[in-house]
Image (cartoon, helix red, strand yellow):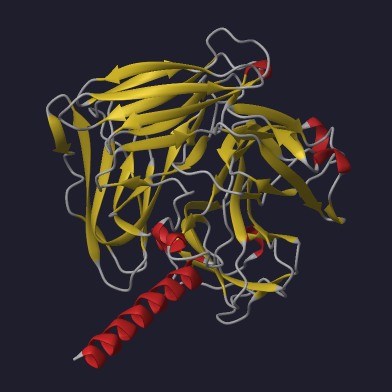
Amino acid sequence: MKLIRRVAAFVLLCAVSAVVVIVDRHSGKQSVGASSAIVEFAGFPQASDGTRISTSWFCPGAAAGDGISSASVVIVNPSDSDITATVNYLSDAPADAETITVVARSRKEVDVLRGKTVGVVVPVVEIIGSFGSVEQELMYAAGDVTSQCVSQTSSTWYFADGFTAEGSTQRLVLTNPFPESAVVNVSYTTTNGRRTPASLQGIILDARSSRSISLADAGAQNEARLAVEVVASTGQIIASRIQHYMGAGRLGYSTTVGTPVALRDWWFTSGRTGAMVSELLMVFNPSDSPAQVNVSFFGAGITNGLAIDQTSTAAAPSTAIDIPAGAIVAINTDAIADLPKGDHAMVVSAVNDVPVVVEHVLSQSVGGSSFTAITNGIPGGLVSQKWRIPSGLLNGARNALSVVNTTGVDGTFTVSASGPGGEVELPLLVDVALGAASVISIDVPADVKDGEVTITATVPVVVQRRTTRGHGLVGFGIVGALPIRSR
């Protein structure tokens, strides 16, 4: 009997170990024990439907000296009970905080800058309980910006796309929300290779503080290709990027939290090709081994996806694109002859065992003006049947929501909005047909109220949305929705 118990225990241990290995391989991370599987993808924007004592949201921050007219965090409470949240304001000055209440089925905007005219302020929101989600919003003459916040820190952060050409600026923001100091090393890669400036090594990041670093001042001037790697040798942090595009084919403003880990699959739902459009997929390989990727497209006129060939403009279903070790490669979708013009979705997949970081850059000229939208990829491991948009959708917006079916079977999806009366399905957006391996963009009904929006599908999907830039400006921003994962 004892022997049987020992054998059973050994088999169970082996099974658990196998599960951890499988999860770690899927995530592209080295295993540091069973806990690494538990927090898989936690550094990416997502929401949980599980029960938690508290939830923290780390946002990219706002630069008061950039001419921003206002900056806020939007805290959304779709539940039936009030929630309590503490908003921490981290900068190069002593940290400050305030506690607020967000009543049931409502949202609350909290000013981040609070009269500050210089420096960067990074909001960190701590919510009691598992309900509630947070996004950051900036009002700016160069284009309003909605940015996602994340719920976990990391010791590594990556940025595949950087840009300082023709007077454009890029600022790296490092935030330490913890009560002990952190030590951080920063390197960047251009078309001339990788650099590790002495001024960016061994940076002491004080407890509960934030620091802003100009990439141009660190030697990365007039660069059209600029990937950044941030490694905390002590502690865990949040790294974000603030960009102001002023030329060389780009125009606009962008803030985003970085990518905490390189992975093997990255989804994008809001691609576009056509006249006066420039679309790039920026692929960064931070490892010491060469990587290879395929890009497949989904949309009208595309059958069974369409992979691209790095050596020609023709479709090539099996040819991979080489991404040298430590290098950046810009994939120009305009150069693909067989890709129909118009909107499409994309998935970038590593075909060998080397993960990468991918960002989507879309620039377009419209009516004598132009805009640039930047977005991080959504990991394949975060594909879900339920998604949440905390700050909601603009009434009557065209092609505001893009949903891609990641499977080979037909499905449907329903869009619901939360308000004072609870969650209500939107007319004409109930059981919307979504074909196998297809993407659909939908308009927002004119009578949608302010409040969180939820997308529920019968198949695993990926969701991104297009946001208005305001001020009568042309174009849009691209922001991912929050996948809802069970804990």
Q: Is residue 401 left or right of residue 201?
A: left
Picture quarter with the C terminus: bottom left
Q: Residue 141's image quarter?
A: top right
Whether residue 393 is visible, yes or no, is: no
Q: Nearer the viewer, residue 124 or 469?
A: 124
Question: 215 left or right of 29?
Answer: right
Question: Does 193 sit left or right of 153 as displayed?
Answer: right
283 versus 50 height, above or below: below
User: Does the image show residue 65?
Assistant: yes
Q: Quadrant of the N terminus?
A: bottom left
Q: Position of residue 455 (x, y in %)?
A: 27, 47
On screen, residue 413 above or below 143 = below
**Toward which corner of the image does residue 140 lie, by quadrant?**
top right
Residue 133, by quadrant, is: top left
Q: Nearer the viewer, residue 325 or 321?
A: 325
Residue at (61% x, 58% y) in the render: 357
Q: Which residue does the image show at 47% across and 37% down from the upper left? A: 149
Quick check: 46 above or below 253?
below
Q: Toward the viewer: 235 or 406?
A: 235
What's the residue at 56%, 31% (across, down)?
A: 179
Residue 171 drawn above or below residue 151: above
Residue farthest to the left?
Answer: 421
Q: Residue furthest front?
A: 2
Residue 113: x %, y % from top left: 55, 15
Q: How many marks?
A: 0
